[in-house]
Amino acid sequence: MTVSFPLLRLPAVALREVLLNFGTMDLLEFSFTSTRVRDCVFRSARLRVIEHNVEFLKEYPHIVTVFKNDDGLHEHKLEWEFVGGQLAGKSHQEERRIGCHRFEKCHKNGNIIQCHFHNPEFGASVVFNHISKIFQGPVNLFLDLSHIRNLYSILLNQNISECQKLEVYEGYNNEQNDEDLYGILDMVNIGKELKAYVTNQDEIDFDQICHLESLTLENANWMTLPDLISLNCRYGNFINHKFGPFDVNSFAENWYNSTNRTLAKMQLGWDVDTELDLKKSKLEWKKWDPKIRSRCFYDPSEPYHSNRIDCSEGYDITRSDGLTATILVRDGFECYALFLVWHDPYPEKTRLNQLRERMAEEFKKFENVFESHRGNEKYVTVGKFVKSWIESKEIAHLSFEEWKYALDYITEDTCHLYNRIVKNVNDIQKEIKLWESVDNTNNCIL
């Protein structure tokens, strides 16, 4: 005989303890029961949301919510993916209800729900309203204009349009895109970062972007020198623009005579045939002195394989407050002019300490997983690999045969966790070697 249990009648503390034992997907499924349950989940299950990624990049929307686990080391994701006719081959399809909206064709696989809906853009808006209500956190919005049918209906949703980061892509079918960046920004409130790879806008309301921490524009031909000087961003990147050597020198002079301590990097697309003549500058530019700064500038806005900028050929100025800036032109795959501010004159030392701390965190993850499986005798095979990695501080990928052997005794999620840790450690080790070479070079020169 089945007996109902009045879960929602439990005291708040007891209810919270119960919900803390729910998995993330279980909480989401539970919240579909009713509005009251949804609000209860929001009040009681305070999960640590790192970010929501709301993506309209392909034909169908994709929502990814990233959580930080209680141990502070691990992360996990909850995904809702809209699909076309791919669900036809899925044997187990279920219905989800959100308010008065029915999502009839849904298939759950782990922490991923795939869903076929007649209007996926509207469906994504409904789903994200629900998810953001119970799991509150910052929003990153990604738009490919060539795939979006009704952009403004999306942006009317404040849960989506209030975002910390916005990335806009023009896509391959730009001739049919009536939307311009001016109109998009008029409906979106961005907190920190804008990347706009759009060419069909003539102008942007400067007040909408001047406060952003990071700003990338493919088309900045509308910008003037006063606009450039007035920016308060930390990272700026303007690919197409009308600035020349005079403007770059004026920008540097303005920084030199200011007290601005925000700017770290300004990057301007540059014509390889245009000379940046510093002799016409009012400032006394000097060649690199290893006693003042390092050879390589650290750019945390870039991935590890491109976050070091060799400034040995750059020219420096030092302000009265001791802050040094470097100017140089880099001609590689793309040519661009750089103005770099050295908030840390020897970033390799700081970065190496950060990387070693991250390495220790990754090995801690290994230790935690190894300890959790210690009672399983058949887990010893995998455990030996883990233990050897921890002791040697070196990690290598397990072969397919080794994983195949181990899969009979450990969960698939654990295997995915191992592979993520292996990738993280290998990336950290590669970056450590690169920064160690910078450190050694500086020591030899000094």
Image (tube, rainbow, N blue to C red):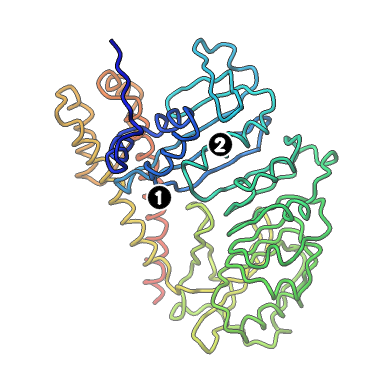
Question: Looking at the picture, how far across and down is residue 277, in whole percent?
Answer: 72, 78
Q: Which residue is mark 2?
A: 63
The residue under the point 58% across, 64% down is: 213
Relative depth, front residue between 408 and 284: 408
* The C terminus, quarter of image: bottom left
Across and down, in percent, residue 366 comes to: 26, 40
Q: Which mark is residue 430?
A: 1
Relative height, residue 60 to residue 221 (above, below): above
Q: Quadrant of residue 150?
A: top right
**Lateral position of residue 401 relative to residue 177, left or right:** left
x then y, percent, for residue 118:
68, 23
| Depth order, front residue of 198/302 | 198
Which secondary structure lies at badge 2?
Answer: strand
In the image, residue 436 sits, relative to residue 45, either above or below, namely below
Of residue 415 and residue 102, the one placed in the foreground of this image is 102
Q: Quadrant of the image for the N terminus?
A: top left
